[in-house]
Amino acid sequence: MEIRAYSEAQPFTTTDGSTIRSLLDLSVAPVANHSMAEAALPPGGRTDRHHHKVSEEMYYLVEGEALMEIDGEERAVTVGDAILIPVGSWHQITNTGSGDMRMIVTCAPPWTAEDTYFA
């Protein structure tokens, strides 16, 4: 049985200012087919536009509001919205709210840095 407490997931900040907590991924658990993390952005923050050649990704907003862009199409998203990012799709999310934006991020197969390509 693999259970990780939120407090065990040590946050780190990426070059674009996102704070990531790896909850269950290849770095901390014997996952085979997917990974899960929490990502947070401060007000006005945005991820670097990128895509994955292998992984399908999903976002689930748990706090705040944002503008989601996938392959040039933009849409406002908020708490409770689930977002599918197909394999190979260029994407970026921008926090448009006045507070932090937090989301759960899953990837299948598991996320790897080698599968992340930037614009």
Image (tube, rainbow, N blue to C red):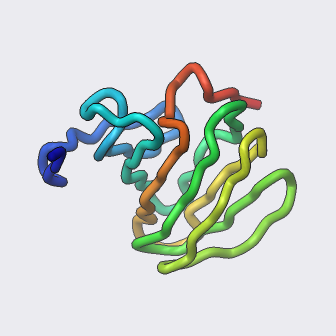
Q: Looking at the image, is 83 positioned above or below residue 93? A: below
Q: Looking at the image, is 104 positioned above or below residue 20? A: below
Q: Position of residue 17 (x, y in %)?
A: 47, 42
Q: Position of residue 16 (x, y in %)?
A: 53, 38
Pick the residue in front: 9 or 15: 9
Q: Position of residue 98 (x, y in %)?
A: 47, 73
Q: Looking at the image, is 14 positioned above or below residue 97? A: above
Q: Indicate left or right for 107 with 119 as reference.
A: left
Residue positioned 36% across, 29% down in the render? 26
- Tally of marks: 0
Q: Position of residue 113 (x, y in %)?
A: 52, 24
Q: Indicate left or right for 68 with 40 as reference.
A: right
Residue 90, quarter of picture: top right
Q: Indicate left or right for 45 with 19 as reference.
A: right
Extreme-top residue of the structure: 114
Residue positioned 52% across, 45% down in the render? 107
Pick the residue in front: 100 or 86: 86
Residue positioned 49% across, 62% down in the render? 43
Q: Looking at the image, is 84 positioned above or below residue 35? A: below
Residue positioned 70% across, 29% down in the render? 118
Check the picture and name the quadrant holding the C terminus: top right
